[in-house]
Amino acid sequence: MKLFIRYLNLMVVTIFILLLFSFILPFLFPGDLLTNISGISPQSNEQRIALEQVYKLDQSIFHQFAFYIESLLDGNWGVSTSDQSNLLHELLLAFPATLELVAYALLIAVVIGIPVGFLSGLKNHNPLDFSVVTFSIVGYSFPVVWLALIFITIFCLQFQWLPISGRIDLLFDVPTETGFILIDIARSGISNKADAYLDALHHLILPTASVAIVTTALFIRFTRRSIMDVMEKDYIIAAKSRGFTQRQIFFKHGLKNALLPILPLLVLQISTLITNVMIIETIFSWPGIGRWLIQAIYQQDYPAIRIGMLVVSLCVMALTITIEFITRAMNPARERAESATV
Amino acid sequence: MQRFNLYQEEYHPSPLINIWLEFRRSHIALAGFVLLVVFLVITLLAPLIAPFDPYLQNTNAILLPPAWEPNGTVAHLLGTDSLGRDIFSRLVYGCRTTFGSSLLIVAISVFIGVGLGALAGVLSGLRSSVVNHLLDSIMSIPTLLIAIVMVAILGTGLGNAMMAITLALIPQFVHQTRTFVRNELQKDYVLLDRLDGASSVRIFIHSILPGMVELIVVQATIALSIAIIDISALGFLNLAAQDPLIELGLSLSQGLEVAYVAPWLIILPGLCIFLMVLSVNVVGEGLRSALRTRLHH
């Protein structure tokens, strides 16, 4: 309970700091403060004064902050400088697309990376382990950008098996509801759903693969290291001497003790994963938040950058803190300092 | 057994040599080390290695393929780009920018990170808890996001991108140093120092830091590989190095414009980045296992 309060406190403080930071951002951005906050460049003096009153720029900084929080809670997230579109609406379109890529890549990394890591860690120094380690080192040495470009040259330009960009062929008229393309297809009323699924999956393969390879390689490395460490511990030797089989030892002692310390490490990889996904999005024209933010940079769309940064960092942070709390709660004996080394 | 000469009989390698002996036993790690040295030499001596001026435009030889292709010439070993500039020279200069700036980034973040980490390790109670959790939170913000905000505030440029990546790399050093210092402070040799009247600063520099160097070096190799990947990715997105500067990620995005006719223009710079990161990772992995074996004995 005490732990819960501590982590809740941490969460609240971090959220507050992020909000404060995103509130300060428009003051730091170059250009007109009013435009940076509102996304509207005033055409006349009257409009400027009116806007200043709306955003409380004529009042103290505390009022401005209060107003900022209030409008965030109201869902009034401002408009983009470039095309005056509603930012909340845009984000709701872009964010699930990113989440989709992240989720699939993470799924692949967990489903493949962790078991393979265990396998090669348990049977270390045999040919299988050697090839897994080689794959892992090569895998996480790949610059994602280059990997994606190589994939495009081979599979799209050379053999023309897979599409280069987008999420689904424009011929399929799938309305956006949840933002997750696979769910949207299921919920839409189009007649040829099987074809649409096939097409969407074709679009998914390359972006997911480019991100997943790097993440999987990292996961393999962490798991392998961790299980190798655990298997040398005294309690494992004790269990061995009591006559347990290798399988029993692994499932009873090894698995849990190896997984717990690396959980925070794996969570930290999510931030790398998101960076990679954002880069991949720009390459494959995936309509996610990474592409959106980078477009915003090119167009100097400051309100968009501010909101995008706030949303992404809030999500990552909340996820990190939650998982840290869960790890901690599951294993109260473990001191923080004891978390695994790479 | 009697021994007349105590010292000439046995050879006691110093910890550093010990690590090198252990490191040398793995041929792959050694190969990675050689590759890393090659990149270091390229970084330092780029003008001497490059056969052409990287900005020299040879309009008679535009989009020349590498020498092993039927149309290639030996004069331009790796071909030329769409303006007739020699690729090999450009790659050499590109390696210089990418590798050099990454080294700089890591050096700065080690310096700041270890300092802050020592501070956080010495602090206790509420203050340390605030510092630690805040740093952990920064650590979880994606690098690209920090870079985007940085670029939005300060404008694009290699320097700003480097600053953003440094900011993203610092927390891991802080984290590691803090944990290490925390653990060491409870040991007896530190207590001994303290009884002798050493100040916290002195204890850290003279007693704790020497034992920590290896850990930091290993962590720095990880950071270096991240820095290389990040700086080239930002270069690719046109957020870091700008045009007249030659940088591998930027070359990659420039090669993209003619990827149909000249695929080597995206393959070669990418390969350079890949080899660079691979060599750093292999060396890091070799160092780590060498350290591990030494600590076991």
Image (cartoon, coloured by chain):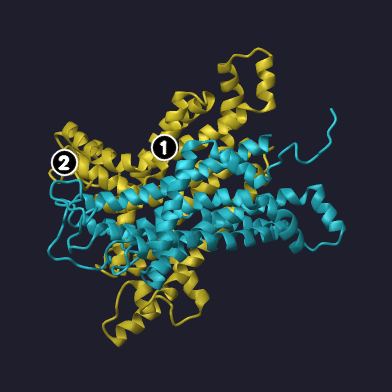
Chain colours: A yellow, B cyan
Quadrant of image for the C terminus of chain A: top right
**What residue occupies the far front of the structure in this picture?**
B4
Q: Is residue B142 visible?
A: no
Specify whether B89 is left or right of B283.
left
- Estimate the x, y position of residue B104 in percent, counting from the top left: 49, 63
| Label 2, residues with CA under 10 Å away: few <14, some 14-19, many ≥20 | few
- Estimate the x, y position of residue B280 in percent, counting from the top left: 46, 48
Mark 2 = which residue?
Answer: A158
- Point 35% across, 43% down: residue: A211
Numbered circle sitting on residue A216:
1
- Point 46% across, 66% down: residue: B163
Q: Is residue A99 visible?
A: yes
Disc 1 secondary structure class? helix
> Are the residues under badges 1 and 2 in a single subunit?
yes
| Circle count | 2
- Indicate the quadrant where residue B125 lies: bottom right
- Point 69% across, 50% down: residue: B211
The chain carrying label 1 is A
Work out whether B11 lies above or below B192: above
